[in-house]
Every structure is written in C-alpha cells, then in structure tokens.
Image (tube, grey):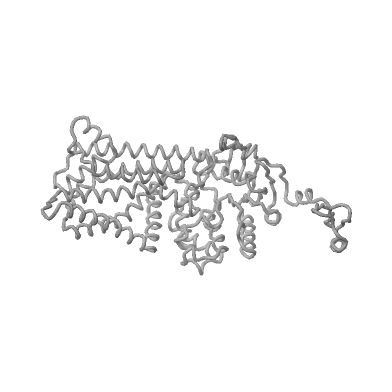
Amino acid sequence: MNELKLFSAELRRGWIQFIRYPAEAISGIFIITALFYGLFLGAKYVAGPGLQLGDRLDAIIVSYVLWTLVTFILFNTTGTLQNEAQTGTLEQLFLTPFGAPRVFLTRAIADLFIQFVLISTILILISLLTGRYLSFPPALFLPLIAVIMGAYGISFALGSLALLLKRVQQLLGVVQFALLFLMTISTESLTGSLKILGFLLPMTTGAGLLRDLMARQQPLNFTLLGFALLNGLFYFGLGLLLFRWAERETKRRGRLSGY
Amino acid sequence: MQVLEVQHLHKTYRQSGQTIAAVRDVSLTIAAQEVLAFLGPNGAGKTTTIKMVAGLILPDRGSVNIAGRNPHRDPRAIGLLGAVLEGNRNLYWRLTPEENLEYFGVLRGLSRKTARQRGRELLDRFELTHKRAATVQALSRGMQAKLAIAVSLIHRPQLLLLDEPTLGLDVEATQTVKRLVREIASEGCAILLTTHQLDIAEELSDRVAIINQGAIVAEQPTQDLIRQFSGTAYTIEVEDILDDDRISKIQHLGGFGDCVDPKIIVDQK
C-alpha cells in the first residue's frame, strides 16, 4: 500500500516534469530515431540495392530499441543522484522513512513507465521509416521483465559507484558501448563454453528471447526464460546490495551531497 | 520533554593522508518549544553535526536520539524530523509549491489526500496561496525560503533542523524567516539551527552553543552568554595611531582612545 502511494507520487512528479518541458522529450525521440535511420541508410548504401535484410532487420530494430530502453534504465539511478545533488534535493530523498533504496527503485520504475511512452513513439517512427512491423505477442513481457531486472541491477551498481566516486561520466560512456554489445550479441547462436558465458552475462539471454519472439516469431522457450529470469534476479539483488552498502559507506565518509 | 538528545558525537575525516577532526565530543539536548542556535565560523563543524543528527552522516562515536529513536538505525526517527539543509535549494524548481508540498508529504509517509490538505494549510499560513500554481523557479528567493520551510513541516515533525536559514536572503525575507522560526517553536517544535551570524542566534534562540574547531566551547541560555561574552566594554585594535579628529568623534560616540596607543575602548553602557 505504501509502495503504491510512493509510486503514484513518483509517477505524478515525473509526468508533470515531462509534460511541462516537452522539448527535452521531443529532441530525445528525434535524436534516437534519426541515429537509427542514419545507420539504416548507411548500411543500405554500402550493401547496394540488392540488400535483403528480412527478419534480420527486425532483430536489429528489437536490439536497438531494447538498447535505448536499457540505456535509459541504466543511467537512471546515476542521473537521479547527480541531478538531485546539483539541484540540492538529494539529501531530502534520504530523509524518508521509506529508505533511500526503495525511493530510488520506485522512482526508477515510475520513470520507466514514462519512458515507455517515448520508446513506443520511437518504435512507431522506426517502423514507419523502415517499413518493418514487429509482432508483439503477450509472452514478450516475461523476457522483458528479465532484461529490465538485470538493467536495474546494473543501474544500482552504477548508482553505487556514483555515490562513492561522484564523477563517473567517463565510465558511463564506456558502459553504454558495452551495453550495445550485450544487447546485440546473439547468445542464441553460441555453442559450448561460450553459451555458458552467454547465460552469465547480464541481460543477454532475455534480449535473445525477445529477438526470437518479436523478430523471428518463434514460440517462447521456457527453459531459456528460466535462465533469463534467474540471471535478472541475480543482477537485481546484487545491485540493490551494492547500493545499500554504498549508501552506508557514503554516509560514513560524509559525502552524500558533495558532487 | 527532551526531543533531541545528542551524546558525545565524534567525526573524523581522512583527507590527503591527513586526519581531520570535524566534530569532537559534541553533546546537546533540545526540548519541545526550544530553539538552540549552533553558532560558529565556517568549517567549525556545525553542518557535520546537524547532518549526523539527521542521519545523513554516520558518526564515528556517540549517539543521536530523536524522541527516543536513533535516526541511524530506526527509519521511524527520520519521520520525526524535518530539515532545510540547502537553503532554498531543497525544492523541485520545475514543480509548483503545491506539487512540491504534495510530493514531499508522500515521501515523508503521508497519504496524498493528507499531504494536499496540509499543503494548502501551509501555503495559506506562509502567505503563498497566490503563488501555488507558479513554478518554484518563478518565485522570489524569500518565497522559496518560506516554501522550503513549509515543505519541511508538511509531516508535522517534532524536530526541525535549519542549516543557515537566512543565508543569502534580503532583509525582508530574513525578517519573515525569523518570524516563522519563532512561531514554529512556540507551537511545540524543537528547533536546531546553525548560523555564523551572532544577531540571528541572539534574536531567535533560547540557548546558544558555540562551536569552534569541532568542539562546543560554550553552551548557555542566549541572554547569559551574550552578557558573559560582551562584558561592559570592548577594545578595538586599529592599524595606525588615531588622529585628534577621529579621537574626538569616537569620544562623541561614547568611546575612548588616545594619540599614543592604537586602541579604541567602547563601553557598552
């Protein structure tokens, strides 16, 4: 009940700021869509008129949109910490009986709901530009949840680093490209020990399942889904544990607000 | 009834291989309806102490109790305190006063309905109702300061922490903040405020604790402390020997000086 109350407050806060300053959202949609379309046209030009991407293009679209979504989640905690520290509201978020990790997680989920509006718009625009329309079977929510849990885990781990080290912009740049690798690596085609590594890497199994469902119209593989959910839970738990530890350590160092 | 009890707080930081004692053996208590001013120069340890009270900095040693609860262990203790730590900056500038009050009310554990209702009452009381729908960034600095205090009171805390509440405010806004602090205390809230301005401590507090280099060097009722430290006369040392014209002007003001010693002695009476 309390969580719902907090979630509704966070959703309202985020939505008001989102609609009050729409230029930021619109420019975000434009940049992400234009970047994809630029890459798409470039690939077409290099490959010549005979290029037939078929369901591979659909898989690329799924990976790209997923990358956009996961990038948003990943930088949400760090972004919140840095923005709130700059505006002066950060310490107020720690002065709550809910506890800071709960507030940050609830805010991240509320922000994700708003982000879905942006992602859906980007997906529609990309579909219109490329002429490819993805399928959306209801089963896709299961692997999506696995990917999102993993993303939140990494997000909290990065947030822990931001709490402790304060300036992590350089690291975030590197993480963004590592993420592109994680989202696009085709773990479903790996074999032997590489396949095991694929299960251990964060979010990759879930991303592969989403490509199967949305681009290749394959049925959901429940064994792989089990691995994807375990993987997501592991990284989610690890991220939260790290965040709790980092909060205490930052309070011990007396550096909660100093950015 | 003691609302805040702080016992033997210690905090040291390590910086560039050096150990800095930020707070040394600080103990204090504040009762309901009482204002304690924490007076000291910049870097004396005021903010570190107030943040240890708020549970935002972990002490190396010592204990903090807010109405019998430890803010470092019991989350319910956090619900008993309100804090304005960054002047007018502890607000969302893109939200309106009404939206800020509602959001922070829920964050402090209130229902949305209660937060809204109390928000309206506070806006009315702080004379901000006419600005309820304007974004915070469009408000004057004085209004922002009032709103920051209103937000810290939304959950009706027993203890209010104010870190340099009048810093950067103009004369009018300073007067308003002073009036509000006195009103809030008279309604039963215990207030701990930090300041480096003697006049603020003198006007607002019932007791003053002077902190220097991390340790409390004096703690007394405000009037006693002012009397003790002011004495009947004080001496001002000047750089050069004074000329006759200046000496006569000082004498006209009730002071004393001569052409040999570079000193002025002023009797308070």
Residue B268 figure quarter = bottom right
Q: Nearer the viewer, residue B208 or A72?
A: A72
The single residue placed furthest to the left in the displayed view is A50
Task: Identify the residue shown where x is 43% and y is 57%.
Answer: B112
| A13 lies above or below B214 | below
Find residue A93 and report its horizontal and vertical position in percent: 47, 49
Q: Using the image, determine if residue A212 lies above or below residue B167.
A: above
Q: Nearer the viewer, residue B95 or A36?
A: A36
Q: Residue furthest top?
A: A193
Q: Position of residue B198 (x, y in %)?
A: 70, 53
* Percent x, y of residue B163: 59, 51
Looking at the rendering, in which quadrant would you find the N terminus of chain B?
top right
- In the rendered view of the protein, which quadrant contains the C terminus of chain B? bottom right
Residue nearest the observer in this picture, A170 or A221: A170
Q: Residue at x 46, y 53 (%)?
A: B110
The x and y percentages for residue A159 are 41, 43
Instruction: Looking at the picture, tell me which residue is in the foreground, B36 or A35.
Output: A35
Residue A149 shows in the view = no
Please, which residue is most extreme toward the bottom here? B130
Q: Left or right of B171: which side holds B93?
A: left
- Tell me what residue is drawn at x 71 percent, y 44 percent: B219
